[in-house]
């Protein structure tokens, strides 16, 4: 199933972009957290530009990984490649909770990153995301409420019931 999803997302990425200046060799594997963080900043800019390519990078990076959250990362990344921003943000939410579980089982990935929670995301249901440490940049509301969000601990975010539902 993952290989089919990878193929579909790569196909969408190839159709949406003609930039061949950045080619990936077969021996290079994308950085899971790095690609995720690029998606986060793209959505915070209210953009979907490049999301199919970035989503494909997330799926490729997750290929071969096991453990908590990996399936949610892959499923969320597939939806994040969507052309409409609402679907992309919903996919990003699923991917965020998957990545949160994965990072909590791989603590070295926490370095330089933090968890943020926006209580108003998704009609006041709220949602977490991971971003580089620094100024809050909300991927769920973008420019409308760019700095809406509270930093929370990794442990508290992982205990949130919303994380278990994703």
Image (spheres, rainbow, N blue to C red):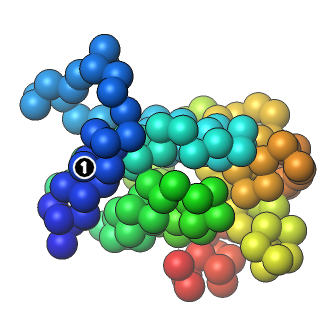
Q: Quadrant of residue 25?
A: top left
Q: Residue furthest top?
A: 21
The residue shown at (28%, 39%) is 14
Residue 28 at x, y percent in the picture = 19, 28
On the question of residue 118 being in view, the answer is yes
Residue 100 at x, y percent in the picture = 53, 60
The secondary structure type at the circle numbered 1 is helix
Q: Nearer the viewer, residue 23 or 131?
A: 23
Q: Nearer the viewer, residue 33 or 122?
A: 122
On the question of residue 114 being in view, the answer is no
The residue shown at (28%, 20%) is 20
Q: Nearer the viewer, residue 121 or 33?
A: 121
Residue 33 at x, y percent in the picture = 45, 42
120 is higher (above) or lower (below) than 34: below
Judging by the rendered image, the residue that carries numbered circle 1 is 11
111 is higher (above) or lower (below) than 66: above
Q: Is residue 46 left or right of residue 7?
A: right
Residue 61 at x, y percent in the picture = 28, 46
Q: Quadrant of residue 149?
A: bottom right
Q: Residue furthest left?
A: 26
43 is higher (above) or lower (below) than 7: above
Q: Pick the quarter of the image with the N terminus.
A: bottom left
How many residues crowd around disc 1 within 10 Å: few (fewer than 14), some, or many (20 or more)? some
The residue shown at (48%, 45%) is 51
The residue shown at (56%, 85%) is 165
Q: Is residue 32 left or right of residue 85?
A: left
Q: Is residue 56 left or right of residue 150?
A: left
Q: Nearer the viewer, residue 70 or 82?
A: 82
């Amino acid at each position: 199933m993952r290989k089919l999803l990878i193929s579909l997302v790569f196909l969408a990425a190839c159709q949406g972009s003609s930039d061949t200046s950045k080619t990936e060799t077969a021996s290079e594997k994308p950085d899971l957290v790095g690609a995720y963080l690029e998606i986060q900043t793209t959505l915070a800019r209210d953009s979907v530009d490049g999301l199919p390519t970035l989503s494909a990078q997330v799926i490729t990076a997750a290929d071969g990984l096991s453990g908590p959250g990996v399936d949610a990362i892959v499923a969320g990344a597939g939806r994040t490649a969507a052309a409409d921003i609402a679907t992309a943000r919903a996919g990003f939410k699923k991917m965020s909770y998957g990545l949160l579980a994965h990072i909590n089982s791989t603590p070295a990935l926490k370095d330089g990153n933090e968890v943020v929670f926006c209580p108003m995301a998704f009609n006041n249901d709220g949602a977490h995301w991971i971003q580089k440490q620094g100024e809050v940049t909300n991927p769920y509301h973008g420019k409308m409420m760019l700095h809406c969000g509270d930093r929370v601990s990794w442990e508290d975010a992982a205990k949130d019931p919303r994380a278990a539902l994703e």
